[in-house]
Image (cartoon, rainbow, N blue to C red):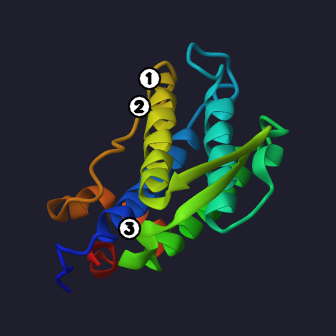
Amino acid sequence: MTPDPRDPCRPHRLMARQNALANVALHAACAQLAPGEWEAERVSFFPSIRETLNHLWTVDVFYLDALHGGTTGYAHRDNPVPWPDLADLAREQRRADLSLVAFCDALTPPDLDRVVEVHRPGGFQYEALPELLLHIGLHAVHHRGQAHAMLAGTSVAPPQLDEFICRGEGNVRADQMAVLGWSEDYLAS
């Protein structure tokens, strides 16, 4: 299938899919950590790989709630480590990632004019949908990059996280595609 290059929603679909693929790769690398490395204190914005990736999930769920018109706001952030176990976090992150993918897959050009009400402490923030989707993607890249750098100080080599979307990168994403049950045709749509 050849996607329409003029479809203004396609970049959002691709970013959501890239996000899911990169998270699968990062969680697979973290699953190889030696005992104690997942929660070990490190130098970064958050003090461990575990806390960094829990923050990523928490913020993803916060924004997914807003995208779907929810009102839970910062309640998701009450517990800084809701998923201390990597397997649980990976499962819940995949659930959040697939929710974002489904949201972006359902987008139509008129949706891009939508304004999203984000419930923040003390008030509301109103964001244009395209900018909010870009922010969600950039936030994830930012914190995955921190976790990637922290992995460099462990027994596990940091995985490739940025070569999943280009057409010629099928060999790089094969394992992650299998985990998600995706085909190359789906990824290209």
Amino acid type shown at disc 2: Ala
| Horizontal side, residue 104 vs residue 1: left or right | right
How far is disc 1 from disc 3 in space, using C-alphas?
30 Å
Q: Nearer the viewer, residue 23 or 80?
A: 80
Nearer to us in this view, 125 or 57: 125
Tell which of 34 and 100 is nearer to you.
Answer: 100
Residue position marked by numbered label 1 in the rendering: 152
- Which of the two marks, 1 or 3, is nearer to us in this view? 3
Q: Residue 13 carries which label?
A: 3
Disc 2 element: loop
Q: Position of residue 155 (x, y in %)?
A: 50, 25
Choose top left, top right, bottom left or bottom right for residue 86: top right
Q: How far apart are marks 3 and 2 (CA)?
A: 29 Å
* Image quadrant occupied by the C terminus: bottom left
Taking 1 as reference, is 49 left or right? right
Where does residue 28 sit, x and y in percent of width and height? 51, 48
Q: In which quarter of the image is the N terminus?
A: bottom left
Q: Compare marks 1 and 3 and give the one earlier in the sequence.
A: 3
Q: Which residue is drawn at 58% across and 20% down?
A: 45
Q: Between residues 174 and 76, which one lies in front from this camera angle?
A: 76
